[in-house]
């Protein structure tokens, strides 16, 4: 099935609220556990969460690694507004900062972050090279990287099945957005080609970790 791109940003407040209110506890907690298992030797200190949305993973990550500080970056004001509410409710304002930036502009290029994480950003980008280059620009030497994103199904019918299985009880708006995100996602061979083109193929590994997610992880050597 050919990839069908979707908009880069969720700017509609209703759309952002539907996303923030959905139950993503299973994949979001799995994200944290993937980091724990695969990058166990790394102690996060200065973390950037690229495409942080309403900050659920930023908060989970900060809870899991009490010595770290997280900078969450997203281009959507609607998402960040909800994210700041969530950060305040979690009592994390001293450890999590959320910034509105539209990649690649504005991200520090000094290599200052020792940990770089991103969930479900890649499939939104008009140019996937933006993510991989941002990782290289913002990461310190040896920085730990974990990227998780959706997998594009083999057919529209399979995408519909995944929506029914994982968003059966959610709003029609969220179901629609999940469907479009699945169609906009990449296949593993496409992601491997992107990483190779960015000279990251030797330091990042790709794994399919569920029927709808892959992870790319490693360190910037």
Image: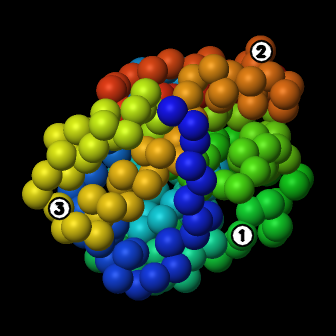
Above or below, 179 against 83 in this view is: above
Q: Picture coordinates of residue 110 (x, y %)?
A: 88, 53
The percent coordinates of residue 167 (x first, y second) are 20, 52
Q: Residues within 10 Å of mark 1 (few under 14, many from 20)?
A: some
Give the label on residue 202, or none.
2
Q: Is residue 218 left or right of residue 93?
A: right
Label 2 sits on a secondary structure element that is loop
Q: Which one is closest to the eye, mark 1 or mark 3?
A: 3
**First in sequence: mark 1 or mark 3?**
1
Where is residue 91 shown, x and y percent of the image? 34, 72
What is the residue that sits farthest to the left in this orientation?
Answer: 169
What residue would you read off at disc 1? 102
Q: Which residue is mark 3?
A: 170
Cα–Cα gap, marks 1 and 3: 29 Å
- Residue 170 vs 46, above or below: the answer is below
At a point 33% along the width and 26% down the height, the residue shown is 211
User: What secondary structure is marked by label 3?
Assistant: loop
């Amino acid at each position: 099935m050919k990839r069908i791109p979707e908009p880069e940003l969720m700017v509609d407040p209703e759309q952002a609220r539907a996303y923030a209110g959905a139950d993503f506890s299973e994949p979001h907690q799995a994200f944290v556990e993937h980091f724990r298992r695969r990058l166990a030797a790394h102690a996060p200190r200065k973390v950037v969460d690229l495409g942080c949305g309403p900050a659920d993973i930023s908060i989970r990550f900060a809870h899991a690694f009490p010595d770290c500080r997280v900078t969450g970056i997203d281009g959507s004001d609607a998402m960040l507004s909800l994210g700041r509410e969530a950060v305040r409710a979690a009592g994390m304002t001293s450890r999590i900062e959320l910034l509105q930036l539209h990649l690649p502009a504005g991200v520090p290029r000094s290599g200052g972050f020792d940990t770089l994480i991103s969930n479900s950003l890649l499939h939104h980008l008009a140019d996937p090279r933006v993510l991989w280059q941002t990782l290289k620009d913002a990461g310190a030497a040896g920085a730990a990287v974990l990227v998780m994103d959706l997998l594009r199904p083999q057919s529209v019918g399979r995408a519909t099945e995944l929506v029914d299985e994982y968003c059966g009880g959610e709003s029609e708006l969220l179901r629609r957005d999940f469907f479009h995100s699945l169609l906009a996602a990449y296949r593993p061979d496409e992601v491997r080609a992107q990483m190779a083109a960015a000279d990251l193929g030797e330091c990042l590994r790709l794994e399919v970790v569920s029927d709808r997610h892959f992870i790319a992880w490693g360190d910037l050597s």
